[in-house]
Image (cartoon, coloured by chain):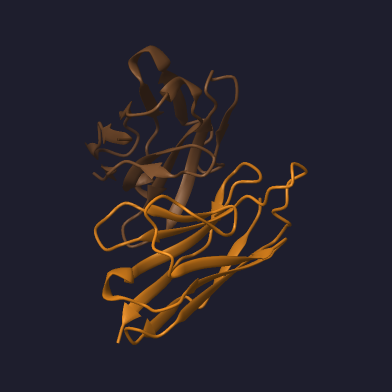
Chain colours: A orange, B brown
Amino acid sequence: DIVMTQTPLSLSVTPGQPASISCMSSQSLLHSDGKTYFYWYLQKPGQSPQLLLYEVSNRFSGVPDRFSGSGSGTDFTLKISRVEAEDVGVYYCMQSIQLPRTFGQGTKLEIK
Amino acid sequence: EVQLVESGGGLVQPGGSLRLSCAASGFTFSSSNMNWVRQAPGKGLEWVSYISPGSSTIYYADSVKGRFTISRDNAKNSLYLQMNSLRDEDTAVYYCARGREQGYWGQGTLVTVSS
């Protein structure tokens, strides 16, 4: 199984400041079809997870452009250009290049 | 609007069974891969099972293999998870999620395994 490792596991950010979360996979997520099957999700308090970014850097419908993703192969980064109060919650990375799908441990973002 | 609505959760004793359902609407269910994902209280997300559109490909996490069975009824736009031989560690909120990207999730249904 592919292991997904997130860092940090928690961070506290002042509104308006940037934030960054990293995720490493134990195997390359680059498929032979040219796509990289890597995703970021946000689970806000009391809610279901919601997809933020798919295939590394593509924002899902309705996701603000302050969220961006980068990376390739096994190393990926989620960046929030200016954190807002509504961004609090737990961020997860996930791979879907192979089954079983695997998630990172989650990174809890709090507002200072 | 895409909607996924889970049901069937509840309190069950260890060794018991439950059948979860997920009613889908707002998209072509019969063309969509579907997944079950769970979240134990205070814990992270754990993928549980996958089923292809025509049910030809099915996959389970090792933690549930041999005890859980995923199925679907494309005529009824519904996804199911039959859970047998339930254990304390199966206590979780169970979500259904659509597609390889798991872009849409239901609100979840809570399964509590306890004596």
Residue B103 coordinates in the image, percent (x, y): 44, 45
Q: How many marks?
A: 0
Residue A77 coordinates in the image, percent (x, y): 58, 70
Furthest toward the right, the residue is: A32
> Is residue A66 rendered to the left or right of residue B51?
left
Vertical side of A35 occupied by B79: above or below: above
Q: Nearer the viewer, residue A86 or A45?
A: A86
Residue B64 in view here? no
Residue A4 coordinates in the image, percent (x, y): 60, 61
Residue B101 in view here? yes
For the C terminus of chain B, which image quadrant?
A: top left
Vertical side of B14 occupied by A102: above or below: below
Furthest toward the front, the residue is: A65
- Image point 40% across, 85% down: which residue? A17
Name the image quarter holding residue A13.
Answer: bottom left
Vertical side of B55 occupied by B5: above or below: below
- Image point 65% across, 43% down: which residue? A98
- Image point 38% across, 53% down: which residue? A50
Furthest toward the top, the residue is: B75
Name the image quarter holding residue A69.
Answer: bottom right
